[in-house]
């Protein structure tokens, strides 16, 4: 008779088989058998969060900075509903998560039992797939499938709901390793013909541009290396989405900066005027395209994506290449070399005019701002943070709002997996728990959450987690006492009616830091900024840095609503020169 | 045009609507229908009719037939999104006008009246293979198989012949000829 294992034991065996080292979770009635089993598995460390949403975001930060799936463990009912925001966030930004939730015992399902909710029903639209384990014999296979679904194709979150009686029930366990791999849904579908077509388009183009996204990061570090090689080989300009930052060096001359609503003038104009647009692992998000009808009107469009449903969803493309970014770029580069097409040289003349045009756009210096001697400008604060941390391998997370855009604009990333931000869902409160996950995965690295004071209060409680596990994350709050992005839109779109966007009664963040047992630092004057940032970096403890910044600062450049890429609103300097008044203002 | 106060773009011109029949082969497991239907409701797609039943007991496969209306772009998205669902094996997509595909719906009509009235009703249904499933002195249940608009029409016409209750299925579809869809 083979040894029988409980559901809880099998769960851990599966996690061990998947080489899981960390779980982010919160205990409760319906997962107690699993928590009881935790002590017997020393290779798996549990990080106790303060709220299940924090567990989800921490697992996201962990996954995005390490390339491994994040694992979350929550109880039934409120435990599961609290993690929904994080699951949705992970779904939108294609982050591999495996969420395990407890459920009331099978015989009580459907009776409105204590802490019961229809977890698989609630999470169906925000996961790639989910399972309710109804039979202990299915558990092992489901766990295997769960990791498979979460990490293959376009990654994303999955959820496994395990009733309490299943956690106690016993069955056999046989290692699945040797068994044939379960069929993977997303196979590489592209062929050499697609690549040849792409190269032909590249060869013909006189105004080409690469537009890269999170797919490059998700494809693994190799994709970024290959991308750099391809960009060098072609001599084409490259721009990146918010999620793609870091896959190409932010300080390289061929890089035009981020594109989209708050992207650079040169990136957006190049997207508008180009004759060949090569989208690598991005999804034509509405923050990127602006007005669809006038999006890049003169270009041939190529879309490289692992998810076939991303193709032609928003923008009709001329050539679709469905496949993993690494494989597609590898084939492209290989073919380029084989055909001995050194586009950088042969095309130089053809695209040199294009580069001249780009240089002209660059002279606008669209990220410029009017600095001050008396008050800290938020952009200046991010720039100083960058200058003072760029020598070390720094990981940046953010919350959502103006500070997020300023971080994206002014912090230059050189490596993938160093930038964790909530792009698709735009979840305020993402950054702090994400920073915890990043620090868990990268214990010796500097992890900074560039935050806003409104966002940070949404998941503030997680600083307690950071302290419990000695995770020296730095919370760098650009404190303008407003929900800055809301305030900015109200200024531009709603006649300065700042309805409910001012936070009265903010806490004293330095005292709050002390209350939690970490270090609080406040900077109020530009003169003291550098010194205080240095102090923050040098403390080996979690730090809450309360950086008081200009309350009225707006995030520019900006594509106003309903406008195409070539009609950007630039910063105050440019506005003064061009005096946008009357009619022009109404168009914002 | 009034000035836009939204940070989202305004809807742009839409292409012509088409009616399609989408056939989905799925694992017959708990909540699979809800995954398919949830995909439609969640993404704002339209379901005109729906028919589901297990077609392969050995392999535990169900066949879902959905009639939907949308722009060609939306129809393409529906197919691609369906293919991403884990329990979905394959997806067929046919235009309603497609001559190579047979579409049928079934309807049950309950007609109340004397035998003359019932015979009249039966006669009216003649074109659509009427079968009497139940008959009493005062009533009959008639089954017909036809296209949707034909059933619509019959349901209207039979009103004067004592029709008191209609029950009907969603459309099911199959390609003509020896080939099967793969």
Image: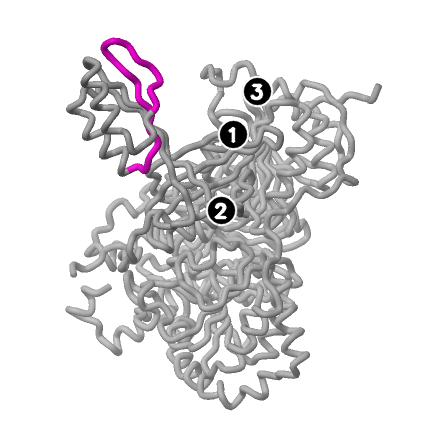
Task: Tell us which disc is closer to us: 1 or 2.
Answer: 2
Front-lying residue, A2 or A194: A194
x and y percent of residue A17 in the render? 74, 38
How many discs mark residues in the rendered view? 3
Near mark 1 (Cα within 10 A), the count class, few <14, some 14-19 or many ≥20, is: some
Inter-mark Cα distance, 2 to 3: 59 Å
Q: Can you tell which quarter of the image residue A160 is in?
A: top right
The residue labelled by disc 3 is A29
Q: Is residue A521 visible?
A: no
Q: Which secondary structure lies at badge 1?
A: strand
* Residue located beneath label 2 in the image: B177
Same subunit, labels 2 and 3: the answer reads no
- What chain does badge 3 belong to? A
Q: Looking at the picture, tell me which residue is in the foreground, A228 or B96.
A: B96
Q: Marks 3 and 1, Cα distance to the nearest angstrom?
A: 38 Å
How packed mark 3 is, by other alpha carbons closer than 10 Å (few <14, some 14-19, many 20 or more), is: some
Which chain is mark 1 on?
B
Answer yes or no: are tags 1 and 2 on the same subunit: yes
The residue segment tinted magenta is B131-148
Sequence-first tag of 1 and 2: 1
Q: Specify the quadrant that holds the C terminus of chain A.
A: bottom left
Are the two marked residues, 1 and 2, in contact with CB atoms closer than 8 angstroms? Answer: no
Report the colour scheme.
Answer: one colour
Determine the residue positioned at 63% across, 78% down: A336
Position of residue A46 in the picture relative to residue A476 (left or right) = right
The circle drawn on residue A242 is none
Helix, strand or loop status at disc 3: helix
Task: Answer yes or no: is residue A221 visible.
Answer: yes
From the top left corner, tell me how far across and down residue A500 is, in percent.
Answer: 27, 44
Reading the image, the residue beneath label 1 is B54
How far is the residue under mark 1 from the one under mark 2? 23 Å
């Amino acid at each position: 008779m083979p040894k029988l294992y409980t559901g809880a034991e099998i769960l851990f065996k599966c996690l061990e088989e998947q080489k899981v080292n960390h779980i982010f979770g919160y205990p409760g009635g319906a997962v107690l058998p699993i928590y009881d089993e935790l002590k017997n598995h020393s290779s798996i460390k549990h990080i106790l969060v303060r709220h299940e949403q924090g567990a989800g975001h921490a697992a996201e930060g962990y996954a995005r900075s390490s390339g491994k799936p994040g694992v979350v463990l929550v109880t039934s009912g409120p435990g599961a509903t609290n993690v929904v925001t994080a699951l949705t966030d992970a779904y939108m930004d294609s982050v591999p998560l495996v969420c395990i939730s407890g459920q009331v015992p099978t015989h009580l399902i459907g009776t409105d039992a204590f802490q019961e909710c229809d977890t698989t029903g609630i999470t169906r639209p925000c996961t790639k797939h989910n399972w309710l384990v109804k039979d202990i014999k299915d558990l092992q296979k489901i766990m295997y499938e769960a990791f498979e679904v979460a990490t293959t194709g376009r990654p994303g979150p999955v959820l496994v709901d395990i009733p309490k009686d299943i956690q106690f029930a016993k069955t056999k366990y046989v290692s699945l390793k040797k068994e044939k791999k379960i069929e993977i849904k997303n196979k590489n579908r592209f062929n050499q013909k697609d690549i040849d077509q792409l190269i032909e388009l590249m060869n013909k183009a006189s105004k080409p541009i690469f537009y890269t996204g999170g797919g490059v990061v998700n494809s693994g570090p190799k994709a970024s290396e290959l991308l750099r090689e391809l960009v060098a080989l072609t001599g084409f300009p490259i721009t990146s989405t918010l999620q793609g930052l870091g896959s190409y060096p932010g300080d390289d001359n061929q890089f035009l900066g981020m594109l989209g609503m708050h992207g650079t003038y040169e990136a957006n104009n190049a997207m508008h005027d180009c004759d060949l647009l090569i989208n690598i692992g991005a999804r034509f998000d509405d923050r990127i395209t602006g007005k669809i009808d006038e999006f890049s009107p003169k270009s041939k469009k190529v879309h490289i994506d692992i998810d076939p449903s991303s193709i032609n969803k928003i923008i009709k493309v001329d050539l679709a290449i469905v496949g993993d970014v690494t494989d597609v770029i590898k084939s492209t580069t290989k073919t380029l070399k084989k055909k001995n097409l050194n586009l950088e040289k042969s095309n130089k003349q053809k695209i040199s005019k294009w580069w001249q045009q780009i240089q002209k756009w660059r002279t606008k210096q669209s990220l410029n701002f009017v600095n001050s001697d008396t008050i800290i400008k938020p952009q200046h604060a991010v720039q100083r943070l960058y200058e003072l941390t760029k020598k070390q391998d720094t990981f940046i997370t953010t919350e959502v709002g103006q500070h997020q855009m300023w971080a994206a604009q002014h912090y230059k990333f050189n490596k993938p997996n160093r930038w964790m931000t909530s792009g698709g869902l735009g979840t305020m409160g993402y950054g702090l728990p994400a920073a915890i996950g990043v620090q868990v995965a990268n214990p010796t690295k500097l992890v900074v959450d560039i935050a806003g004071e409104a966002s940070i209060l949404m998941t503030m409680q997680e600083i307690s987690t950071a302290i419990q596990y000695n995770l020296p994350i730095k919370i760098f709050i650009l404190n303008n006492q407003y929900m800055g992005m809301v305030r900015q839109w109200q200024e531009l779109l709603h006649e300065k009616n700042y309805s409910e966007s001012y936070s009265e009664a903010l806490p004293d963040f330095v005292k709050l830091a002390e209350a939690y047992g970490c270090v609080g630092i406040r900077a109020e004057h530009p003169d003291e900024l550098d010194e205080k940032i240095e102090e923050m970096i040098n403390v080996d403890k979690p730090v809450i840095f309360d950086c008081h910044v200009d309350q009225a600062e707006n995030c520019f450049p900006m594509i106003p609503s309903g406008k195409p890429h070539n009609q950007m609103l630039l910063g105050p300097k440019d506005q003064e020169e061009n005096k946008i008044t009357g009619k022009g203002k109404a168009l914002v | 045009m009034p000035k836009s106060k939204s940070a989202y773009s305004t809807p742009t011109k839409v292409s012509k609507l088409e009616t399609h029949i989408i056939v989905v082969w799925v694992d017959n497991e708990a909540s699979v229908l809800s995954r398919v239907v949830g995909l439609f409701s969640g993404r704002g797609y339209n379901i005109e009719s729906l028919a589901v039943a297990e077609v392969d007991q050995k392999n535990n496969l169900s066949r879902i037939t959905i009639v939907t209306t949308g722009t060609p772009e939306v129809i393409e998205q529906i197919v691609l999104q369906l293919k991403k669902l884990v329990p979905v094996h394959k997806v067929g997509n046919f235009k309603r006008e497609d001559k190579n595909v047979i579409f049928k719906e079934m309807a049950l009509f309950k007609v109340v009246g004397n035998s003359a009235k019932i015979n009249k009703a039966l006669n009216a249904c003649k074109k659509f293979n009427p079968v009497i499933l139940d008959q009493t002195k005062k009533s009959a249940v008639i089954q017909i198989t036809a296209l949707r608009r034909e059933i619509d029409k019959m349901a209207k016409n039979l009103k004067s012949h004592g029709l008191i209750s209609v029950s009907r299925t969603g459309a099911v579809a199959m390609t003509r000829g020896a080939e099967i869809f793969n």
